[in-house]
Image (cartoon, rainbow, N blue to C red):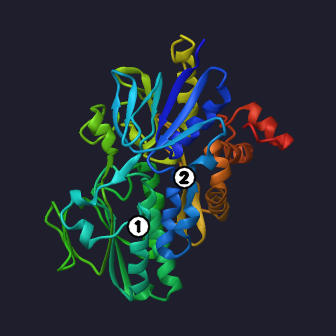
Amino acid sequence: MAKAKVVVLGGGVGGTFVANKLAKHTDKIEVTVVDATGVHHYQPGLLYVPFGWEQPERLRHDERKLLHPVVQLVRSPVELVDVDKRQLRLLHDGTLPYDYLVIATGSCPVPDEIPGLADGGYHFYTEPSALRLREALHNFQGGRIVVGIAGFPYKCPPAPIEFTLLLDDWLRQRKLRDKTEIVFVTPLPQVFSIPTVVPLIEELFNRKGIKVETFFNTESVDPEKRKVISLEGTELDYDLLVLIPPHRGSPVIDASGIGDKGGWVPTDKFTLQVKGHERLFAIGDATDLPVSKSGAAAHFEAPIVVHNLLQLIEGKEPAAHYDGSVMCFVEAGDGKATVLRFNYERPPQPPKPSVLWRWMKALMNRFYPVAIPRGIALDVMFATLQGKFFPSPPFCGSELMEKMRQGDLRDA
């Protein structure tokens, strides 16, 4: 019997996870990843670039080296997903047929959606923008820095909070904190979107003298007058503006007619199948799921996609359900971090910030090229900490625990 052709569209965290997990089943399938450039960017590391604590070249990886050898890689932009013909229309190389498709096209910031933001503000969500912000910070000598969220959705919800706390550290190191006012703005009625996390952030901000402006829906930015204006009529002067732009889904999703008005793929929240398309799955930022757009979410989604896809190939109904699990380590300043672990039903209960959690975050960042694309690092970390911090429910299976005891993680 001919092998099923599985195509993964996108070589980011979600796409790479899925492809490498599918690579263990090549007796049944052929796996191909299609990526516009073949360059894999570790986006969480961009948080540190503006402060000079990370170099962009260390965050770029050859996608070919991250993929299992049996996975084929096609480096080409995709113009269209033709769901009727089950094929991708490539920009320069004709078409690529598929039997099953995994959409992992990610998201992108769109500062132009807010007048003046592209010229008057900074952010760190792409390599060029992070480098531009690094230069602005290098030249900053004091004044008011307005930091915050310009619109929803955006990926990695804690990142603006993390940047603000690290900014406080950076200013103190440069002896500029007493010359600088930090104001955090958000459209929300509180400092963060998840109520159980708010008290911790408020305590950290209060201790560090960071002011907060809630109900601040950014309408426009005046680069010449250095003002940011809200829909509510509030105007804030700034000397440096760092606002996270709203994000949209990939243009190919719009072009293919399979997304909503924001370019997000309508996705079953449990099976991760694209609604109305049994043979299509979506993962990570590309989905319209009610979870954070982050690599951490994609890590937990990947096994569900793989299991359900293989079930379909065998003529069975998808049985695995994604429970909304997300996990992320969050910078808290002062060399400490906390961790958020939650799902559809259970909100996070962040522990007190500690050096341990900061160490875990640093470890994950450093070993990402080896561990994360193969679905190892997050599971290993939770397995290590499970007995002390998470006695129930288990976060990884007994098979992985046994591999840890044997020191064999090659096939984890």
Residue 350's disc is 2
Using the image, determine if residue 237 lies above or below residue 61: below
Q: Mark 2 or 1, which is nearer the eye?
A: 1
Return the residue at label 1. 128
Give residue 229's quadrant in the image: bottom left
| Label 2: few (<14), some (14–19) or many (≥20) C-alpha neighbours in 10 Å | some
Question: Is residue 128 rendered to the left or right of residue 119?
Answer: right
Quadrant of the drawing holding the N terminus? top right
- Mark 2 or mark 1: name the one nearer the start of the chain: 1
Helix, strand or loop under label 1? helix
Location of residue 382 (image quadrant): top right
Find residue 190 and report its horizontal and vertical position in percent: 33, 56
Considering the numbered disc 2 on the image, is that residue within a helix, a strand or a loop? loop
Q: Quadrant of residue 277?
A: top left
Name the kind of residue labelled 2 in the image: Pro
Of 228 and 24, nearer the camera is 24
Q: Residue at x 53, y 46 (%)?
A: 13
Q: Which amino acid, mark 1?
A: Pro
Q: Nearer the viewer, residue 292 or 47?
A: 47
Query: Image point 63% across, 53% down: which residue?
Result: 368
Residue 322 seen: no
The quarter of the picture where the C terminus appears is: top right
Disc assigned to residue 184? none
Which of these two is toward me, 267 or 360? 267
The residue at the far front in this view is 93
Residue 336, position as x, y percentages in the image:
60, 66
Left or right of residue 38, residue 377 in this image: right
Q: Is residue 132 left or right of residue 399?
A: left
Determine the residue positioned at 46% across, 53% down: 197
Whether residue 48 is visible, yes or no, is yes
In the displayed structure, 61 sits above or below 377; it is below
- Spatial distance from mark 2 to mark 1, Cα to Cα? 32 Å
